[in-house]
Image: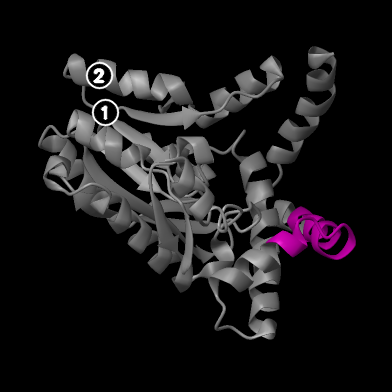
């Protein structure tokens, strides 16, 4: 059954990916109409998240951000489909980097790097990072149940040279590379809610106290990895620019959670700059009322 569903669906996805971007954005507009107007997919979740993150905004502004978010989300869907067939030339035309020299200088100094980031703008097209950065790049990869689709998606995301590692293997890969003095850059998006039983730290994020992922900081200190933050901004429809900010190249000198706090501050700043491009459709604040419950179990 896995192969049958793959054989039916994948050829259609491939054909769609071959369409020019202007046609794909017409498709995006149609998907937006269905998702936002007809089925109202997670519309309540998005508005609730935006309302909690920006309590000072009027309801009209909340609705405007919500609508713009769904416009962007459907663009992201067709852009992700385009990933299957996008060429290196078109990728570098549509997804550029403002200051790759910041990272390449650290690489030239022999540093291995954790690249922190959030689900903002288009993170999918950052799979062209190996073209502009002078080191081996590792990205955390979540397998999907259909092995045929899994192979195609993995192939698409690694076609420019990145190496995808399943979550647990990413941690082991860092340890092995550190032990064998192998340089690398590890991409860790850290803005999702951790499981409560795996939470070590709570912090106000967008004014709301929530559990925070601290894995990037923990691994940076364990293996003495430089920490660089990465944000993508949309310049115009279908065109993005990434920017790098050094958080620290001496992680062991920081107090516990100080690196995490710096990452959160940068992420908040970037979200406030363009809130419609943040991934509001996940329940980011679902544990906001559970701090006392978590504290009681510690």
Considering only vertical position in the picture, is 181 above or below 98? Answer: above
Q: In the rendering, at what x and y percent does residue 294 appear?
A: 49, 46
The residue lying at 21 percent from left, 36 percent from top is 221
The residue at which mark 2 appears reads as 177
Toward the viewer: 247 or 139? 247
Q: In the rendering, at what x and y percent does residue 277 appear?
A: 55, 62
Circle 2 sits in a helix, a strand or a loop, which is it?
helix
The residue lying at 58 percent from left, 56 percent from top is 279
Q: Magenta segment range?
A: 27-45
Toward the viewer: 82 or 184? 184
Q: Is residue 31 magenta?
A: yes
| Labels 1 & 2 near each other (Cβ < 8 A) | yes
The dot on residue 241 is none
The residue at which mark 1 appears reads as 184
Residue 32 occupies quadrant: bottom right
Q: Is residue 157 magenta?
A: no
How many numbered marks does the figure carry?
2
The residue lying at 63 percent from left, 53 percent from top is 283
């Amino acid at each position: 059954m896995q192969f049958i569903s793959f054989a039916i669906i994948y050829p259609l996805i491939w054909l769609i990916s071959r369409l020019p971007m202007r046609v794909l954005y017409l498709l995006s507009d149609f998907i937006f109409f269905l998702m936002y107007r007809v089925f109202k997919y997670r519309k309540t979740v998005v508005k609730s998240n935006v309302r909690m993150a920006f309590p000072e905004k009027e309801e009209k502004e909340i609705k405007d951000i919500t609508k713009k978010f769904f416009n962007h989300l459907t663009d992201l869907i067709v852009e992700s489909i385009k990933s299957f067939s996008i060429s290196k030339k078109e990728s570098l035309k549509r997804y550029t980097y403002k200051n790759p020299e910041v990272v390449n200088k650290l690489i030239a100094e022999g540093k291995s790097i954790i690249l922190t980031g959030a689900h903002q703008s288009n993170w999918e097209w950052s799979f062209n990072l190996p073209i502009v950065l002078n080191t081996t790049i590792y990205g955390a990869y979540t397998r999907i149940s259909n092995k045929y689709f899994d192979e195609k998606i993995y192939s698409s995301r690694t076609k420019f040279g990145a190496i995808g590692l399943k979550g647990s293997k990413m941690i082991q890969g860092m340890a092995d590379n550190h032990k064998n003095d192998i340089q690398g850059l590890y991409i860790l998006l850290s803005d999702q809610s951790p499981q409560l039983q795996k939470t070590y730290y709570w912090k106000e994020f967008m004014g709301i106290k929530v559990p925070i992922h601290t894995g990037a900081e923990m691994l940076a200190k364990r293996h003495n990895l430089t920490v660089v933050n990465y944000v993508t901004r949309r310049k115009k429809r279908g065109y993005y620019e990434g920017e790098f900010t050094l958080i620290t190249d001496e992680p062991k000198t920081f107090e516990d959670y100080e690196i995490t706090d710096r990452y959160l501050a940068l992420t908040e700043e970037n979200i406030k700059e363009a809130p419609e491009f943040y991934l509001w459709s996940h329940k980011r604040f679902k544990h906001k009322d559970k701090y006392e419950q978590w504290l009681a179990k510690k």
